[in-house]
Amino acid sequence: MSREPFLAALRRRARVADLLALAAVPAALLLVFRLPEPTRRGLALSHADPSLASAYTAHFVHLDAGHLAANLAVYAVLAPVVYALCALAGRRRLFRVAFVTYLGAFPFVLSALNLALPRDVLELGFSGVAMALFGLLPLALAEYARATFDDDLDARASPALFFAATSVAALAAAPFDPRTAGVSLASLLAAALYSERALGSVRLPALGDLRRAADRTGYFELVALAAVLLVVVPFVALRGAAVGAANPYVHLLGFALGYVSTYVTALVVAE
């Protein structure tokens, strides 16, 4: 268990370049939003007339302030937490690779998959990319728990968190029907199975260890905040998409692909 004060450890392991990169995203979204509306519409992805350029730019375009504010809020909460988890776990490189991939490649991937479902709408918004970052949260939390609390934990424990979040996402999806209920139940069972597998070999800490751990201000609070986000973000993103113009499909795609790609990468690097 880490003995270094939380803020001191975070200051030592964080990098200014990483923080500037994180701050550049909302700055770019705000700059794009200041463009004239006809220009922004031209940057959105049209199912009737798609282009390679709009497949990328559409994910950074918002037509109304509410949509932009929602995506900025999700990003502003997620990005610092995920980065802090990775930095304190010694996995800054994994975060950087994932971050660059989400911003550089995922817009094209999400747009291509989105075009597979014909819709007479303009596709736009940062939601899918933000949910890809949410997909990194289960892995980041598992790695943080390994580095901070128990060496027996590793990336292989993260599917339990991923399936738990998937179960919540299915419950948040609208309309709620027997299919989404089935997905939620199946995900919950998968989370339980992975939890039993991941925690089966973990040595339970003594009561004194738990008390000392609780006294390490910041470390447990970060875990608690990450756990809350695993439950809250799917409801905020998917419920918001259900009542607005956003596409819930791209939210789920971003989340699933964001997790799977980084999980596979982490396992390959570990081998």
Image (cartoon, rainbow, N blue to C red):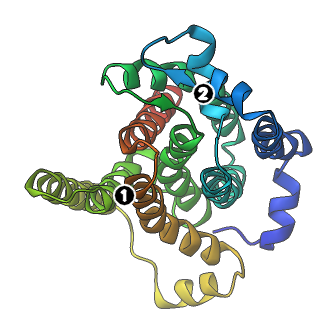
The residue at the point 55 percent across, 75 percent down is: 224
Q: In which quarter of the image is residue 85?
A: bottom right
Direction from residue 207 to residue 114 in the image, left or right = left
Q: Quadrant of residue 264?
A: top left
The residue at the point 89 percent across, 39 percent down is: 17
Give the residue type at disc 1: Ala
The residue at the point 37 percent across, 64 percent down is: 202
Q: Which is in the foreground here, disc 2 or disc 1?
A: 2
Find disc 2 in the rendering and name its residue.
Answer: 58
Residue extending furthest toward the left? 178
Find disc 1 in the rendering and name its residue.
Answer: 165
In the rendered view, tell whether residue 237 sits above or below residue 20: below
Q: In which quarter of the image is residue 20?
A: top right
CA separation in Å, label 2 and label 1: 27 Å
Q: Do the residues labelled 2 and 1 touch (CB within 8 Å)?
A: no
The x, y position of residue 234, in whole percent, is 42, 58
Label 2 SS = helix
In the rendered view, tell whether residue 138 sits above or below residue 21: below
The x, y position of residue 48, in whole percent, is 43, 14
Asked if one can make out residue 101 in the rendered structure from this viewpoint, the answer is no
10 Å crowding of disc 2: few (<14), some (14-19), many (20+) = many
10 Å crowding of disc 1: few (<14), some (14-19), many (20+) = many
Q: The N terminus appears in which quarter of the rendering? A: bottom right
